[in-house]
Amino acid sequence: MNALTLAQQLDADLRACCARYDLDEPFVASFTLSTDAADIEYRVGAKNLPDARVLDWRHPLAEAYYVDPGDDFALDAPGYRAVTGTLERRSALTVRQRALQAIETTTASGMERLVAGVDGFAAPAGAAGRLGTGPLADLRAWLTPKQYRLIASSRARPLIIQGRAGSGKTSVALHRVAWLAYPPEDGGHTPIDPARVLIVMYNRALRTFVESMLEPLGLAKARIDTFHGWALADVRKAYNGVIELDTTPSPEANAADALKKHLGMLPAIDALIERQRAFADVYLAEKLAPYQATGATWLARWRASGGPLVRRLITLRDEVHTANKAASGTEAKRLTEVHKIMVAALTRARHYKEDVVRLLTDADLLAEHLTGVERAEIDTLVAFQRSLALRNGSARHPGPFVRFGDLALLLRLIQRKTGGMPDKDKDDEVFLYDHLVLDEAQDFGAVDLAVILGAVRARTGVTIVGDLNQKIVPGADFVGWDTLAAELGVEGLSVARLEVAHRATRPIMALADSLVGDATSGGREGKLPVLVRVESDSLVADTVADAVLDALADDARAHVCVVVPRAGAVDALITTLGERLAGLAPVRKGHNKDFTFAPGVTVTNLLQIKGLEFDAVIVVGADEVGYPDTAQGRRNLYTVITRARDRLTFVNTNPPCAMLAGAIQAGLVETAGEDEVPSADVGDLDEPF
């Protein structure tokens, strides 16, 4: 069957399937498996539809779609009939409005693309990438064999993926969770519950970007948040008091926040808790002594108990209460008083915010554990934390304010005291997630990582992805991939790497890779990145508007991102661009959760675009001030370049940074504006002066 006939058949079958099952997208792929008995065609979708030969993409037989055409396939899974054969052909489909819009068919001899038009299916005009892929695309039809193998890797092992920009790391991580949540027909394993999945994103913009992908993957009930958003919500849920964030900038605050990321904070917290456990022992011995044998019995039970401090006290409180209900006379009276003592001890053990204040104002404790830190730095931290605690508070009762940097310490302390995350209104249980997805891991420090990993029931239920080339938070001291793998405690665990970038064109990736020393191979064709020099700041908006219109001429539904060097420059450019592009394209601000991922123009800054992707990116001010030739400067420039899928434009009033200047000499970037000389207008030579 030729490609045109196949496209027509699949379009007809798709329309019929949509009507029969009332589904907008019953299948997104098709494959033909050649066996000894016959050639068998299957379709791949989001659920099993046996009468239409549609397989859920997680069905064991659907694995045949994710091998290369010409490769052999064998299925001998428990509960299924053994199938062996060769993948003859696979077709990835783009489906819109219950009709086939495009098809990419691959066989052992090559690949052919067709798109729907007014006259039927035909080859697309010009070069094209993988059809149908958009921001954080649903990968069911587009997974490479390596991506699928990572998704379907052992359920009993964690997964760490280090991948270059645009290699599909985040999409692979989310599809893995969807694969783990698939209930097998033979009951061979227990699927994870999406409601017990935690997905931690780098910032609120990325969270908004990823959130739209969860429902199609069956993960709508998963919890997705930034680290600080998740931490603040859980601390407030666990702590029986008021927590307010202080974000006031100052040199003292910045120095204190930096020191809170020190790895020594983890053993310092453990030391504080051990000190409290010893104090609780003395407290209980003293307070229970008046109750003779009854007090001695419960002191012995306290000392024989094990586990986290708060959990031990909760258990004893409940056991005393149960014993009291069964007792009578003097024993019941004694048990009533013992119960009061246990409640009081528990109350004192759950002053979590006060514990962190005590931790951060104990200079001797910090000096013991924060190796390599000068005492003067510790004294600065202590002084700052005391002043923060006194705001709307007193030396005995600290005020409500904490810093962002305190949240990780609070969570860690609660986890170590309770064994999980408790609910202050229902303290007889703690919550742990069954699976964790951590994106952009390279921008999380050791303390943050320890807290995140402490939120999951077992280290086997972890999927972590990242790329050191995109590390844009200098203060986050990433532990390194090998150390992270060792921290998970699974013998033989290695870090997988995705090398092939699917997002950007080859010219864009060639520029990005030149910054970090990676080799570029393959990839779809596209335009060279362009640097446009303008003479003054007043001309920047006009030049950016022209670049936006060029991108929209290629694709009227393009999403163009304009990246400025400073957050303070965003609003002014939005106003000017809005005037230039009135009636042609909407101009929006991209900040935290207020991102709109739709056709038009988004103006934002570098820190907001981490992990995002756009059809075209316009970088304003790619000079030595914004992107110096340092390790961090290279990472920043690499990150902003790799947000672009099809078009990349730099607009500068100053000379380009050294990295771009080198790329221009190497032929990786073309220039416009700077070297253009307008033709002389000499007027009418037949006209006398």
Image (cartoon, rainbow, N blue to C red):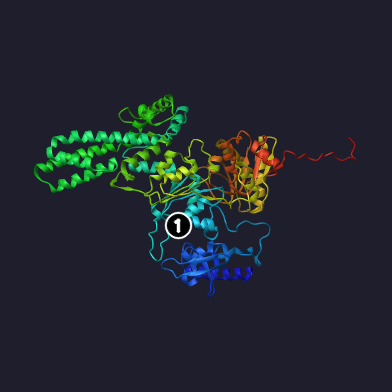
Q: Amino acid at mark 1?
A: Ala
Q: Nearer the viewer, residue 76 or 306?
A: 76
Residue closest to the far bottom: 37
Q: Give the answer, above or below, for where 183 lies relative to 296.
A: below
Q: Give the answer, above or below, for where 53 lies relative to 609.
A: below
Q: x, y (%) of residue 303? A: 22, 40
Q: Residue drawn at (56%, 47%), measured in percent from left and top?
A: 165
Q: x, y (%) of residue 444? A: 47, 41
Mark 1 residue crowding within 10 angstroms, few (<14) / some (14–19) / many (20+): many
Question: On the rendered image, what quadrant is the C terminus found in?
Answer: top right
Q: Residue drawn at (54%, 47%), measured in percent from left and top?
A: 612
Q: Report whether 429 appears left or right of 50.
A: left
Residue closest to the far left: 329
- Is residue 478 in view from this perspective? yes
Q: Report whether 245 appears left or right of 311.
A: right
Q: Residue drawn at (46%, 29%), measured in percent from left and top?
A: 255
Q: x, y (%) of residue 259? A: 44, 32
Question: On the rendered image, what quadrant is the N terminus found in?
Answer: bottom right
Q: Report whether 611 appears left or right of 342.
A: right
Q: Does dot 1 land on a helix, a strand or a loop?
A: helix
- Is residue 23 in view from this perspective? no
Q: x, y (%) of residue 590? A: 54, 44
Q: Nearer the viewer, residue 102 or 296?
A: 296
Residue closest to the far front: 492
Number of dots carrying numbers? 1
Q: Give the answer, above or below, for where 269 lies relative to 160.
A: above
| Residue identified by numbered label 1 | 178
